[in-house]
Amino acid sequence: MMSVLPPVRRDRIVAELPQCFKKEACLHTRDSFHPKVISACKQQRTGTVGRFKISKVIGRRSFSRQDMHDNRFCKDVFDKNYKATIGVDFEMERFEILGVPFSLQLWDTAGQERFKCIASTYYRGAQAIVITFDLNDISSLEHTKQWLQDALKENDPSSVLLFLVGSKKDLISPSQYALMERDALKVAKEMQAEYWSMSSLTGENVKEFFFRVASLTFESSVLAELEKTNARRIGDVVRINSNDSNLYQSTKKNKSKCCQ
Amino acid sequence: MSSLGMEGTEEAQTPAGDPLALPWDRFSSWLHCICVVGFDLELGQTVEALYPPHAKLTDKEKTSICYLSFPDSNSGCLGDTQFCFRFRQSSGRKSSLHCVLDHMDRDSPVYLKKDPSCFYGYVYFRQVRDKTLKRGYFQKSLVLISKLPYINFFHTVVKQIAPEYFERSDPCLEAACSEIDRWPPPAPGKTLHLPIMGLVIKVRIPTRHDKPGTTQLVDMTPQGDAQISVSLPTIHEVDLFRCFSPVFFHIQLLWELVLLGEPLVVMAPSPSQSSETVLALVGCISPLKYCSDFRPYFTIHDAEFKEYTTRTQAPPSVIFGVTNPFFAKTLQHWPHIIRIGDVKLAGDVPKQVKVKKLKTLKTLDSKPGVYSSYKPYLNKDEEIIKQLQKGIQQKRPSEAQNAILRRHFLELTQSFIIPLERYVASLMPLLKSISAWKSPPQLKPFSQEEFMKTLEKTGPQLTSRLKGDWIGLYRHFLRSPNFDGWFRTRRKEMMQKLEALQLEALCNEDLLIWVQKHTEVESVDLVLKLKNKLALAQKEQLPVSADTLQKLQGQVDTIIQELPDDLQDILLKTTSS
């Protein structure tokens, strides 16, 4: 029998809420997880929270592996020679937040025009959408609005967390950056997204950003789950597993019962 | 690699990580190609697109795919339909498989091994009204062509790709192929997370060491996540209960017919019912492999049509599924026919029915049922019938019914095969008869009489409550292609084991001492022999540890160094034949 999930790496364990990058454009400014979420995690009442999908949209016409921060994040290597992605790239990460393990799917959809028509397939069911642009190219920032519209076609906009990310910070001078950031913050506010900037070359903000995304996604999913169970007024009666191994055992039991 | 901490997925992300892997190698370990089959008003069915573009199919293969990818008769099939077919690959085709994969194939259960001579086609067919088209209908199939019999898995994959493709066209297939090309290879025993078109499919590839009948993967997907993640409890099994439900009073008879490799045809109203039923039949004797040809969906255009339907010879040992009413006439002479009607409403309790006389099957509108004059060797298992009937009345979920039926078949097959396994194991020579300096001893020959004698004390009565003529069933089985296939596999495994044991014995000898006591000619002879053995061990994936092989190779190298220089040169260059 299988299905025992691999353990979560120690450096993928989150106990405190990672802070936002700019208070001017962020999803919320609380400095810790929502009290309801903390208590739910303590009591192991986090419901079916177990998997999240994050779709990353790259709002540029052409791009290389260098733009994909999450790859840098996942592998801790910087591979310049990687060929441009055809269509889509995928990674999976295990996280543990407030003692609750879960998997994070990272889908990178390509920015090529040709693949635009299929991108929405990949946004479907995503809890968070990350839209990136090149800090050195103002037109790429303009482009993000269009990508956002496409992305939201297959999603309920009210339940999706949005992030706007400027990339290649290492290539831009501080003064130019200040100008760019001003524009980017404006766009982020318009689309109600949280703004970040980073460099995959130097690694600046890469890890911070992903922990922030993972944490906010987790928090909002647990809150949504709690709301759902409260509404149904079954709260504690349906004691849904807090971790996968529990669920595994209970499913196994059910299975054998029905086979008798 | 370990930094990812995710079982299975890490390899998927690093095509650059394996220096030997070429683009499309990973794709090829799962699929041969993806075809789009459309309907051209002038040409009929045609392959409109092929991915990857360099994939090779002979004209004959393309023709087969075209006919097999569309419903054969006016069965309606409006909307989306999924089914599966199997066809012979053209002769002379070079084995395009990666050597790594053959290595993987070794650890696959025998019924999941790649079929060297056949391809599977996993079809998603869409037929909808479209006034903008001349024909008035949109008719298209997306077909995955693979050597792997992972029916359930590819069913899920094609269901994920096809609707997207029909709506969004080519880049979709390109992206899908590129995603598949980054999947880790289908290594037996591994749990894999395979991303496809925004969905992650979690599967476990079984190994031949798995205990038959155990659930391999438990679905842990919370329901709300169905859009982003799906766990398949099995990669290859079909829902036996659903497939057999139109004929479930006859499961005992059908199991015997399949076990004995009797010619069997399924006449069904649609390709999906035909293919499912054939696959269920073939799968009901698992873990035994069904060794004859089977065609989940067969049409009058098939290359083997004449061969299989001729009246000049006895019908061949084959199971096939058809939908074209034409077959009712062509196959009137067939000994065993299953006729399936349109799907019944769930919860309908089938009434007890008798096996029908073959002569009643004459017209196109014959009633559903099993038509055969076969008398089962074993008595009917009334208990399983009652249990399933009760389940229907109580509205027991289909998965539970399937599990009950699957376990029934498994226990039956195992009860039947265990005495054979036990007897065949006794044909192995004693361990002490293996010597480093002699070729491996021979296996004792299979003797039907001796085997029958063992049945008295250690027959199936030990594990099965079923009564009947087990002896008769064994006698018949020993003449069947399934026995032949099973015995060949066992024999090969045992012979390989003997070779491996001999290699180990050699490895434990000090060959250098031997060489010092023998002439140069004898030493050279030994070196050549050992080289051959080592090559064979690698080629046939003998069950020897890498350690043993390495040690033996070391011994060979040491012997060569003891020989004169000119001989050394020659021996080092000689590659074993």
Image (spheres, coloured by chain):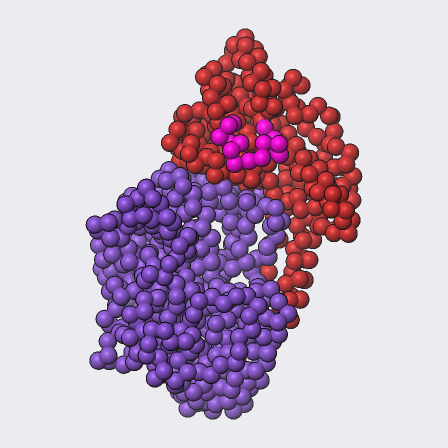
Chain colours: A red, B purple
Magenta part, dominant SS: helix
Q: Nearer the viewer, residue B95 or A233?
A: A233
In the rendering, at what x and y percent does residue A143 appear?
Answer: 47, 21
| Viewer-side residue, B439 vs B97 | B97
Image quadrant where residue B341 sits: bottom left
Look at the image and tell me whether residue A101 can be seen. Answer: yes
Q: Quadrant of residue B382?
A: bottom right
Residue farthest to the front? B131
Q: Residue at x 51, y 59 (%)?
A: B234
How many numbered marks appear? 0
Looking at the image, which residue is at 43% across and 43% down?
A: B164
Q: Is residue A256 above or below residue A47?
A: below
Q: Give me the residue at 57% from left, 23% from top.
A: A191
Rendering coords of residue A250 (x, y %):
69, 58
Q: Position of residue A175 (x, y in %)?
A: 54, 8
Q: Is residue B544 magenta?
A: no
Give the side of residue B31 with respect to residue A174, left or right: left
Q: Nearer the viewer, residue A101 or B548?
A: A101
- B104 relative to B319, above or below: above
**Of residues B143 and B480, which is closer to you in this image?**
B143
User: Which residue appears farthest toward the top when viewing the image?
Assistant: A175
Left or right side of B76 for A76: right
x and y percent of residue B550 in the render?
42, 57
Confirm whether residue B486 shows in the render.
no
- Magenta stretch in the rendered image: A148-162
Question: Residue at coordinates 42% horizontally, 78% vertically from top-left?
Answer: B370
Vertical comparison of B380 with A247: above or below: below
Image height of A109 relative to B532, above or below: above
